[in-house]
């Protein structure tokens, strides 16, 4: 019997026994060598490694990012001093520093009365409903004096606001609310978003440590996260922010990033990776403390811990420490598509002479330049930097490698493999027929 594998043919042909044994050993060694090499490749393939390609696309127009602005002062002075914060030492931007659970419990009760008062006021703010909180907060439209996009006044449909527990009311331009977002076909300093902000420090709480605004530039489909992202800037300046868009495409499971399309996820908490992580922390908080952290705006339907309750606050701190020390990982992979913006910030001081010629100075003569912030956000070019993950080993490459190894060690091609399969099938059939007739003879 002939075989496409040369060593097997020599075994099957009518040669002396020692020749057959020799070629059988050659066949076994070659088979072992090919299977060993293939097994190594399979182990590499099952690691699902990736390679990343980078290319620059020159677009004719780009989707404009969302721009969120938060006033560093959360509460209006005239209301808060009279109604809500009488002689309060609280600085909201430092709220987390008050939530310290000392090992010496006496330090909590007697040595830190200032923090206790601050926490009581902060807890009162958290327990307000949205309407009362909005009345106490700085209205975002109070500090936004003017807004234009590509030389045209901003539409109310492109503006939205949200409440952040750390910064109060914030405003977002170009947030995707389901009706699409703005795109721009212009780039350069004379294009994009122009904002004029009135950051009058006289309206700030006496305890506010910083005068200015928090600026967050983000994907229009993502919720802004002022506490972890963005930068701060002070009044009295003209700030220019030039942008370049970066896009990262990742691979889903089984590849190592195991990315998720959060935008397609129907779970409310998983609209973004940040919200997913916060929801994970809240689950551990509720499981261990029977209450959740009120400073995280996730799972608000569950009971909130009291910021003035020593036991509950220490429990929240213990949970957070356990998550860090035991390295418990929340199942919140990276998003499959991430859009970020590389920014270059430049700013210049507003001169009194130049500001006196500004239309704002003529409209409101009492407004001083050191209370005003001019903000211009624009694309420096329409170059889009794209990073895309690819599988290091495609299935076609895997099959090609297996064929190469069989060809190198056994002289077996892909077509010849079917010949081997055919001959094996014939041998199995003959053996089965022989066994069948033998069984028939034995029964007679």
Image (cartoon, rainbow, N blue to C red):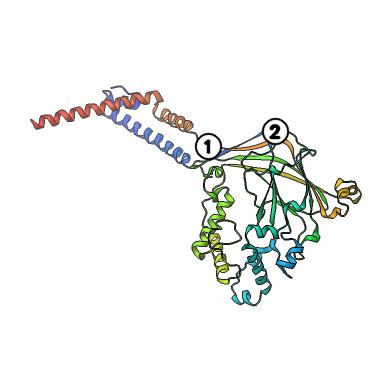
- Residue that appears at 76% across and 53% down: 142
Q: Residues within 10 Å of mark 1 (few under 14, many from 20)?
A: some
In this rendering, position of residue 336 left or right of residue 110: left
Q: Is residue 271 above or below residue 315?
A: above
Distance Cα–Cα, label 1 vs label 2: 32 Å
Which mark is nearer the camera, 1 or 2?
Answer: 2
Residue 413 seen anywhere in this rendered image of the structure: no
Q: Which mark is residue 61?
A: 2
Provide the secondary structure element on which disc 2 rests. Answer: loop
Residue 192, by quadrant, is: top right
Measuring from the top left, give residue 71's x and y in whole percent. 73, 55
Of 269 and 38, the residue lying toward us: 269
Of 120 and 342, the residue lying toward us: 120
Q: Is residue 319 above or below residue 107?
A: above
Measuring from the top left, give residue 433's x and y in whole percent. 19, 27
The answer to which of marks 1 and 2 sits earlier in the sequence is 2
Q: Residues within 10 Å of mark 2 (few under 14, many from 20)?
A: some
Q: Which residue is mark 1?
A: 392
Q: Which mark is residue 86?
A: none
Residue farthest toward the right in the current orientation of the protein? 353
Residue 128, by quadrant, is: bottom right
Residue farthest toward the left in the current orientation of the protein? 444
- Residue that appears at 57% across and 44% down: 335
Location of the C terminus (image quadrant): top left
Of 206 and 261, the residue lying toward us: 206
Q: Are marks 1 and 2 in contact (CB under 8 Å)?
A: no
Residue 267 seen anywhere in this rendered image of the structure: yes
Provide the secondary structure element on which disc 1 rests. Answer: loop
In this rendering, position of residue 201 left or right of residue 52: right
Residue farthest toward the top in the current orientation of the protein? 2
């Amino acid at each position: 019997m002939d075989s496409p594998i040369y060593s097997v043919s020599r075994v099957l042909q009518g040669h002396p026994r020692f020749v057959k044994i020799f070629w059988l050993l050659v066949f076994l060694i070659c088979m072992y060598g090919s299977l060993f090499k293939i097994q190594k490749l399979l182990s590499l393939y099952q690691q699902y490694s990736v390679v990343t390609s980078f290319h620059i696309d020159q677009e004719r127009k780009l989707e404009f990012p969302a721009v969120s602005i938060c006033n560093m002062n959360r509460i209006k002075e005239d209301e808060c001093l009279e109604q809500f914060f009488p002689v309060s030492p609280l600085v909201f931007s430092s709220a987390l520093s008050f939530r310290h659970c000392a090992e010496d419990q006496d330090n909590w009760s007697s040595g830190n009365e200032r923090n206790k008062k601050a926490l009581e006021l902060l807890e009162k703010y958290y327990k307000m409903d949205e309407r009362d909180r909005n009345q106490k907060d700085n209205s975002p439209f109070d500090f936004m004096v003017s807004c234009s996009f590509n030389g045209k006044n901003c539409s109310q449909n492109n503006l939205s606001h949200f409440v952040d527990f750390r910064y109060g009311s914030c405003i977002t331009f170009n947030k995707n609310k389901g009706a699409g977002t703005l795109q721009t076909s212009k780039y350069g300093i004379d294009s994009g978003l122009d904002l004029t902000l009135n950051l009058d420090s006289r309206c700030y709480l006496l305890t506010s440590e910083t005068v200015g605004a928090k600026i967050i530039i983000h994907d229009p489909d993502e919720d802004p996260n002022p506490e972890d992202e963005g930068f701060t800037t002070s009044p009295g300046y003209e700030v220019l922010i030039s942008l370049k868009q970066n896009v990262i495409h990742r691979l889903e499971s089984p590849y190592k990033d195991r990315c998720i399309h959060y935008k397609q996820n129907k779970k409310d908490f998983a609209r973004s990776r940040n919200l997913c992580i916060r929801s994970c922390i809240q689950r551990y908080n509720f499981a261990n403390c029977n209450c959740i952290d009120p400073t995280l705006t996730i799972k608000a339907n569950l009971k909130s811990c009291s910021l003035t309750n020593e036991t509950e606050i220490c429990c929240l701190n213990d949970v957070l420490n356990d998550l860090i020390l035991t390295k418990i990982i929340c199942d919140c992979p990276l998003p499959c598509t991430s859009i970020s913006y590389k920014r270059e910030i430049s700013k210049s001081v507003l001169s009194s002479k130049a500001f006196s010629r500004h239309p704002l100075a003529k409209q409101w003569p009492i407004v001083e330049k050191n209370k005003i912030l001019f903000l211009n956000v624009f694309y420096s070019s329409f170059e889009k930097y794209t990073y895309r993950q690819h599988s290091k080993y495609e299935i076609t490459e895997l099959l090609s490698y297996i064929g190469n190894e069989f060809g190198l060690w056994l002289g077996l091609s892909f077509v010849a493999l079917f010949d081997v399969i055919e001959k094996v099938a014939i041998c199995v059939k003959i053996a089965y027929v022989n066994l069948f007739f033998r069984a028939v003879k034995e029964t007679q």
